[in-house]
Image (cartoon, rainbow, N blue to C red):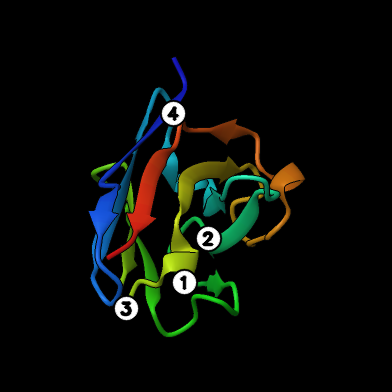
């Protein structure tokens, strides 16, 4: 069964940090690019970060550049999103997703075909 499972979300104060994890199962992670997306209440799902299949290329949304870092460990079938200096506007459900064209990244929701169930991140004092 092809599956992505996110974990690591929670409640954190502004300025705090979290590490989100995305665990892949049922397929070989090496061939796919992975994107992290988020969706806040009443808003559209937006791309946050992406990493290509070998980890040689990363792309970030302007709103998270310098604060978030995406990385992957293909041997462990894991992708991570390190989030620092979190702000209230980072509050959302965070999803990871696979992009079949593994060599490139995209910020478009439609470019990804397999999604996890999401993990809630709440930034509040």
Looking at the picture, tell me which residue is in the foreground, 89 or 119: 89
Kindly state the secondary structure of the residue where label 3 is placed: loop
Q: Is residue 12 left or right of residue 81?
A: left
Outermost residue, bottom direction? 66
Which residue carries the number 2 mark?
52
Crowd class of label 2 (few under 14; some 14 to 19; many from 20; radius 10 Å): many
Residue 85's disc is: 3
Q: Is residue 26 above or below residue 122?
A: above
CB of mark 2 within 8 Å of CB of mark 1?
yes
Which residue carries the number 1 mark?
56
The answer for how far apart the CA atoms under marks 2 and 1 are is 7 Å
Give the percent coordinates (x, y) of residue 93: 47, 45
Disc with the residue nearer the chain's start (2 vs 4): 4
Outermost residue, top direction? 1
Kindly state the secondary structure of the residue where label 2 is placed: loop
Residue 27's disc is: 4
């Amino acid at each position: 069964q092809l599956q992505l499972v996110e974990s690591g979300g929670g409640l954190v104060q502004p300025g705090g940090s979290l590490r989100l994890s995305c665990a892949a199962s049922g397929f070989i992670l090496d061939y796919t690019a992975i994107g992290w997306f988020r969706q806040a209440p009443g808003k559209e799902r937006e791309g946050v970060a992406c990493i290509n299949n070998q980890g040689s290329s990363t792309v970030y949304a302007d709103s998270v550049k310098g604060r978030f870092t995406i990385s992957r460990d293909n041997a462990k079938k894991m992708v991570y999103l390190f989030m620092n200096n979190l702000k209230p506007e980072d509050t959302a459900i965070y999803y990871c997703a696979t992009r079949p064209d593994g060599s490139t990244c995209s910020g478009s929701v439609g470019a990804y075909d397999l999604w996890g169930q999401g993990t809630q991140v709440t930034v509040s004092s």
